[in-house]
Amino acid sequence: MSRVHDALRRAEQGALLNGEAPAEVRTEAPRTPEFLPVNRGGPASSARSTLDPAALRDIETVPFNPAPESHLLDLNTSHETPAEEFRTLRTRLNHLQTLQPLHTIVVTSPSPAEGKTFTSVNLALAQAHLTESSVLLGDFDLRRPIVHNLFQIDRSPGLSDYITGECSFAQSLRRVEETNLYLLPAGTPVKNPLELLNMRQAKQLFEDLPRLFNWAIFDTPPLLFSADANLLSTMADGTILVVKIGTTTFDNVTRAIQSLCENNVLGIVANGARASELYSKYTYYYSKTE
């Protein structure tokens, strides 16, 4: 992770930058995750152990109707620089997938307001833009869920309802109309999200999802404010850490990576780049008249 640390140290020394697009993505070949013990008891322990791929045919379809403040990208605008950045991230992840099994990804950040939800949602959209790729976007931030608001859908039934056996997996999903993007909202509020995520059914879900989706991308709570993302990262194939240039401290990045044991960190997304830096990368290729 030395290259990542060096890049972040240089970024921290710069001035506060504006914008919403990720400035740079550095990826490394993920190491084998070290799984933490998972509680095998609870009300969901007797639930079915596998998901039926045929169930995806009976999922509720919702229109693509993002909220005005969602900052969802229009990937049909090929010259839009932020969209290009997410295509770059998509390309790098798809390359890593050819090297080893890589289907489930946790997206998190050291602290709140660093762009983890912005990154997870737009990465999922970028992956789903490939017609042959079925993608799941899951809201695993059960403490402050927001994905249902961004897509203007109901919060429940969702993840918590499925894990507790209140609904089937198909009933917890929504499919975005005319896309290969499936949404798994947070579901009914729960008192202790960490206990819910520690149930056997949650771990089983991570094991079954690669049979249904080429990519499953999860928005999770910040690492330094709860243990949820740390637990989820032990069950996923890889973790992406989102930091905000000029805001995230190098110390927080170091603490966040150490909490993950560096065992499955795929890379770091640097959010909040200066717009002029991003646009200069594409000026050579696209003229104003195109």
Image (cartoon, rainbow, N blue to C red):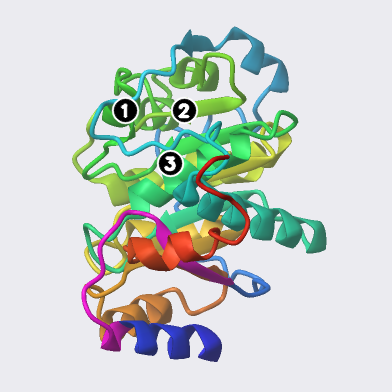
Q: Which residues are magenta?
A: 12-26
Q: Nearer the viewer, residue 124 or 82?
A: 82
* 96 lies left or right of 167: right
Tag 3: amino acid? Val
In contact (CB < 8 Å): disc 2 and disc 1: yes
- Please name the residue that numbered disc 2 is placed on: 183
- Please name the residue that numbered disc 3 is placed on: 121
- Label whose residue precedes the other's in the sequence (2 or 3): 3
Residue 75 at x, y percent in the picture:
53, 36
Q: Which mark is residue 229?
A: none
Q: At x 25% / y 62%, what residue is drawn?
A: 18
Q: Is residue 172 above or below residue 2?
A: above
**Residue 121 visible, this orientation:** yes
* 145 lies left or right of 276: left
Q: Nearer the viewer, mark 3 or mark 1?
A: 3
- Label whose residue precedes the other's in the sequence (2 or 1): 1
